[in-house]
Amino acid sequence: MTLFKNLIGGEWTASHTGATFETRNPADTDEVVGVFQKSDADDARQAIEAARAAQPAWAAIPAPKRGEILHRAAAILESRADQVAREMTREEGKTLPEARGEVGRAINILRYVGGEGARLGGEYAPSERDRVFIQTRRRPLGVVGLITPWNFPIAIPTWKTAPALICGNAVVLKPSDLAPLCAVRLVEALHEAGVTKGAINLVTGPGSKVGNELVTNSAVKAISFTGSEGTGSAIAVDAARRRARVQLEMGGKNPTIVLADADIADAVNVVVNAAFFSTGQRCTATSRVIVEAPIVERFTAALVARAKTLKVGNGLETGIEIGPSIDAKQLATVLDYVGVGTAEGARLLTGGERLSSGPHARGYFSSPAVMSDVAPEMRIAQEEIFGPVLAVLPARNLDHAIEVANGIRFGLSAAICTTSLTSAYEFINRIEAGLVMVNLPSAGVEYHVPFGGSKASSMGMREQGSVAIDFYSEWQTAYVKY
Ligand code: UN1
């Protein structure tokens, strides 16, 4: 069992509080994974100060050279990929293949964003006036605060930190208390790769103290947050009060439409992946499957049959497909929503039970739940659950399916299974979602294209892809007369 420290001003530092907290394996709660600093606002302030002091020196390094440092960090992380993936499975619960995939994603992000260093160009524009050149270039914002969730414990810290750094900002990263270890590993790699001391800082501890300081401290020019809608909305208000830039990625209630012309076996695979893999703990997960009337029964039967075969257990073991919920609270939410759905008149076709004997005795496991006879206005069809609970809703036709799909507050991701090109494009055109998938799971995105949602799911500029740097930079326009 290891004690992990904050990184402040390039030094691994204990919190001045002297307090720590531990993380435990959600698949085996007897196992302590790590012990971390229970920091408070003073620690966060110190990190912000260190970031402010270091930022000019970091920004003075030519952007392509900053990119080389990110490339070095990628190589360091790659040399530790297996260890970091195992730590992720032990701390977050996702299966080892999923964890390996996520570490690979983080490495790819560092490489991709590192390349952006050489592409941070601006524009030349002709002037209305004689002998005047107009040029634009990107400038860093200064200090940025990054608040990240537990469910993608390395990918999300990486996809916020890398574009922030490549633009020349200094970073204070606050990872989730439930799974901070991978963020420590990312920051170690960046520190060892040669990021200027103080340009990358890590502070662990409660959101109410560390996160709140980042959001309210006037030296922090931008906040990027992924997490719950409630916290995100509060951040937006606090940040607006002092005119800080915000980028929020919050909830989803993502639909997959299955049309009668779809290949049923393919559609079942797509929906099972989207709804149940990563234990449904992805904001891009499918939690509503909207099925065209002629195939509702056939599709649902095949879906239930497949859901029953899913192997739930400790993600370190070979063959396990679904890990535990992250903690007791999340598991209680999952089981509670199954009860809510039943009370609303939905029918539980399979799963939705706590698994607590044998190999499941010491973890937060439940069996993947499929509920039918769900009406669009029911709570299980409207509220984010963040667990392996899938609602099946019937639809008369494509128009009706799109109407049901759009009938929610959220708009992150949406998928359709169909063999009709016309239906696919009709869906792309009319669905209210930032991410649209055809014959693919609603979750599982790539790093080099924009990521984000509409409606209550997101606020601010998109993450990932080359547009990620828009959030972390501002334009300077220079007029030059010769
Ligand atoms: C994915 O589906 O690959 O927190 C990524 C989340 C999202 C990331 C999803 N921000 O689940």
Image: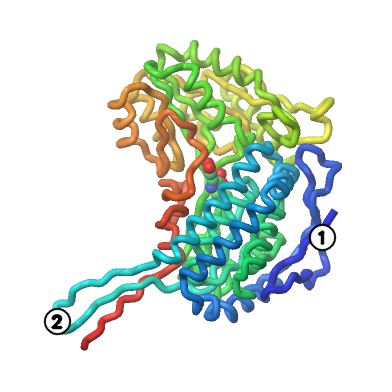
- Looking at the picture, how far across and down is residue 16, in whole percent? 78, 73
Left/right placement of residue 354 relative to residue 241 reads right
- Looking at the picture, how far across and down is residue 216, in whole percent? 57, 70
Front residue of 146/105: it is 105
Name the secondary structure under disc 2: loop
Q: How is the image coloured?
A: rainbow
Q: Quadrant of residue 466?
A: bottom left
Location of the C terminus by quadrant is: bottom left
**At 70% from the left edge and 55% from the top edge, which residue is drawn?**
180
Name the secondary structure under disc 1: loop
Front residue of 232/177: it is 177
Q: Earlier in the sequence, mark 1 or mark 2?
A: 1
**At 59% from the left edge and 47% from the top edge, which residue is drawn?**
104
| Alpha carbon distance from label 1 to label 2 | 63 Å
Hey, what amino acid is under mark 2? Answer: Arg
Q: Any atom of ligand 1 within 8 Å of the CB at mark 1?
A: no
Q: Quadrant of residue 161?
A: bottom right
**At 32% from the left edge and 23% from the top edge, which residue is drawn?**
420
> Which residue in the rendered view is the most extreme toward the bottom?
482
Q: Any atom of ligand 1 within 8 Å of the CB at mark 2?
A: no
Left/right placement of residue 24 relative to residue 264 reads right
Residue 322, compared with residue 195, is above or below; it is above
Please tell me the numbered disc located at residue 341. none
Hey, what amino acid is under mark 1? Answer: Leu
Residue 212 visible? The answer is no
**At 45% from the left edge and 48% from the top edge, which residue is drawn?**
451
Q: Quadrant of ligand 1?
A: top right
Q: Report the number of discs.
A: 2
Residue at the spot of label 1:
3
Please tell me the numbered disc located at residue 129. 2
- Looking at the picture, how far across and down is residue 252, in whole percent? 51, 41
Query: Are there few (<14), some (14-19), or many (20+) residues within 10 Å of tag 2?
Result: few
